[in-house]
């Protein structure tokens, strides 16, 4: 394919997907390999031919994992000097994260560098050199992992400030272009190592597929594009359902069972994948812990949602799920369980426990989260609920706290961590936010303090 046809393909793809605009400053994610060298050259051609007025800078991250990484870095620096472009260089200064693949761990720190460099450079976007073959590899990897329909769009041409201008160009076209123009590039010898999943696909599996159909990668690219168009329609419905039936809190996620009246199993599974899967909706505490629900867990959640009885299961040590009559709860156990009982000798200082706080007042404001405390009750002990705990009701007869929780429909996962207030006589005087000791005092006297909390524990509604 001639240079003009290549440029036309990139220009049209960019226009269709709104990747590049006139006067844009594009930060090019550059590795020195053939794909990124091709990306740099064709973007420079687009500028030099007057097709678009663009500004460029380059971002290179050295993972320091290969013996030739310094040689590669020097090649990148010479390329930047050749084109007179500003180059931002990052180097790995810490160990890679454990528990995930080397490829994923390296990608994580590389994109942390990209985010920082985007801000520093003031660029409108960062262009990566993913091509048509990369798209086919990603599609197949997602398919093999049981990604569901949402994963079949593979890589999107644009995600936020990240753009992929050569996603529709094959690796064969890239190498032919570079050879024809005698442009040199750096070869990463680890790409020949099929121990990595993507390399195995690239070096062994896709060549076998292309023996069946030599246009297989192009057909996969088109299928991914169709999937993306369909997912745009499906996602619109998913976001409507999220707004109506899902509550995302600091300590938990709640999915109302009424959602079952508005969607079938397939749509429910896609919603759960969008919310909790690998390419999930942005839920800060799931992202922080790197937790996602694989296909097996999505299937289990779907089955539990349709179950009429209450059930619980542990997702990881950090996340637990519970289904109740009203819906499905997914709990952030770090925020919920990580507090210790403590004593309060006075309420002059505000005490905070994960999402709720204790303070004092001398004026009854009539709030539901207030309790009258006699000075003789001090020191107060704030502790977790224990099985068998009781509290006196308005008739001064004892009630089990278990009953109080049942009436308030508090999930089992929360009950064992729910804070109760115990006085100096070890009498429970308050199940915080739910039920408090009844008093026969008709008026607030000088030795009475009103204890209050800002919100119900764990922000539970």
Image: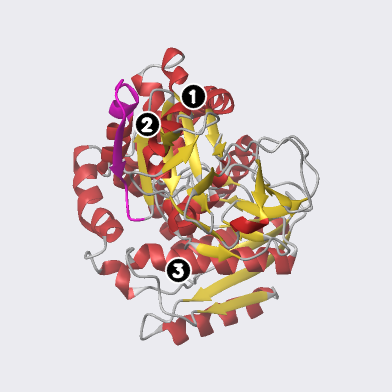
Front residue of this view, candidates 308 and 232: 308
Say if mark 1 contacts mark 3, CB within 8 Å.
no
223 vs 34: above or below: above
Figure check: 438 above or below 20: above
The reply to whether the magenta stretch includes residue 313 is yes
Whole-angstrom CA distance, mark 1 to mark 3, is 37 Å
Where residue 303 appears, as percent x and y from the top left, is 28, 27
- Would residue 290 appear left or right of 447 to someone viewing this image? left
Q: Horizontal placement of 278 versus 31: left or right?
A: left
Q: Is residue 197 above or below residue 373?
A: below
Which label sits on residue 33? 3
Question: Of marks 1 and 3, which one's residue comes earlier in the chain?
Answer: 3
All told, the count of numbered labels is: 3
Boundaries of the magenta span: 302-317
| Residue 322 placement, left or right of 357 | left
At mark 3, the secondary structure is loop
Check if mark 2's residue and mark 1's residue have beta carbons within 8 Å: yes
Its colouring scheme is secondary structure
Residue at 49% in and 70% down: 31
Q: Which of the two discs, 3 and 2, sits closer to the camera?
A: 2
Residue identified by numbered label 2: 149
Task: For the residues labelled 3 and 2, say whether their Cβ atoms are less than 8 Å apart.
Answer: no
Distance from label 3 to label 2 (Cα)? 32 Å
Q: Which of the two discs, 3 and 2, labels the residue nearer the N terminus?
A: 3
Mark 1 or 3: in front is 1
Q: Which mark is residue 234?
A: 1
């Amino acid at each position: 394919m001639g240079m003009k046809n290549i440029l036309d393909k990139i220009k049209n793809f960019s226009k269709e997907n709104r990747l590049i605009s006139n006067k844009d400053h594009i930060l090019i994610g550059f590795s020195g390999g053939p794909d990124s060298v091709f990306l740099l050259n064709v973007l420079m051609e687009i500028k030099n031919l007057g097709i678009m007025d663009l500004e460029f800078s380059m971002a290179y991250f050295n993972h320091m994992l290969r013996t030739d990484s310094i040689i590669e870095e020097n090649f990148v620096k010479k390329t930047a000097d050749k084109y007179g472009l500003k180059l931002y260089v990052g180097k790995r200064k810490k160990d890679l994260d454990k528990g995930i693949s080397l490829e994923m761990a390296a990608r994580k720190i590389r994109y942390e560098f990209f985010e920082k460099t985007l801000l520093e450079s003031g660029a409108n976007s960062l262009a990566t050199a993913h091509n048509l073959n990369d798209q086919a590899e990603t599609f197949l990897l997602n398919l093999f992992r049981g990604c569901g329909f949402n994963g079949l769009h593979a890589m999107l041409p644009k995600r936020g400030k990240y753009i992929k201008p050569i996603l529709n160009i094959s690796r064969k076209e890239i190498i032919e272009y570079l050879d024809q123009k005698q442009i040199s590039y750096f070869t990463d010898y680890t790409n020949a190592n099929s121990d990595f999943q993507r390399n195995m696909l690239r070096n062994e599996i896709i060549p076998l597929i292309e023996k069946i159909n030599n246009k297989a990668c192009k057909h996969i690219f088109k299928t991914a594009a169709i999937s993306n168009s369909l997912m745009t329609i499906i996602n619109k419905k998913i976001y409507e359902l999220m707004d109506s039936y899902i509550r995302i809190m600091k300590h938990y996620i709640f999915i109302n069972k009424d959602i079952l009246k508005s969607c079938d199993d397939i749509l429910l599974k896609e919603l759960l994948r969008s919310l909790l899967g690998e390419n999930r909706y942005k839920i800060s505490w799931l992202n922080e812990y790197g937790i996602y629900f694989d296909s097996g867990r999505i299937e289990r959640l779907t089955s539990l949602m349709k179950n009429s009885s209450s059930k619980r299961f542990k997702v990881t040590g950090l996340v637990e799920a519970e289904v109740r009559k009203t819906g499905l709860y997914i709990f952030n156990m770090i925020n919920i369980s990580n507090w210790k009982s403590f004593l309060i000798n006075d309420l002059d200082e505000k005490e905070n426990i994960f999402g709720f706080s204790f303070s004092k007042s001398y004026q009854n404001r009539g709030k539901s989260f207030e309790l009258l405390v006699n000075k003789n009750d001090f020191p107060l002990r704030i502790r977790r609920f224990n099985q068998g705990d009781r509290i006196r009701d308005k008739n001064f007869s004892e009630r089990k706290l278990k009953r109080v929780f049942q009436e308030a429909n508090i999930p089992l996962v929360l009950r064992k961590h729910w804070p109760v207030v115990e006085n100096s006589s070890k009498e429970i005087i308050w199940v915080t936010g739910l039920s408090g000791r009844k008093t026969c005092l008709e008026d607030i006297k000088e030795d009475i303090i009103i204890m209050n909390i800002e919100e119900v524990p764990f922000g539970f509604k």
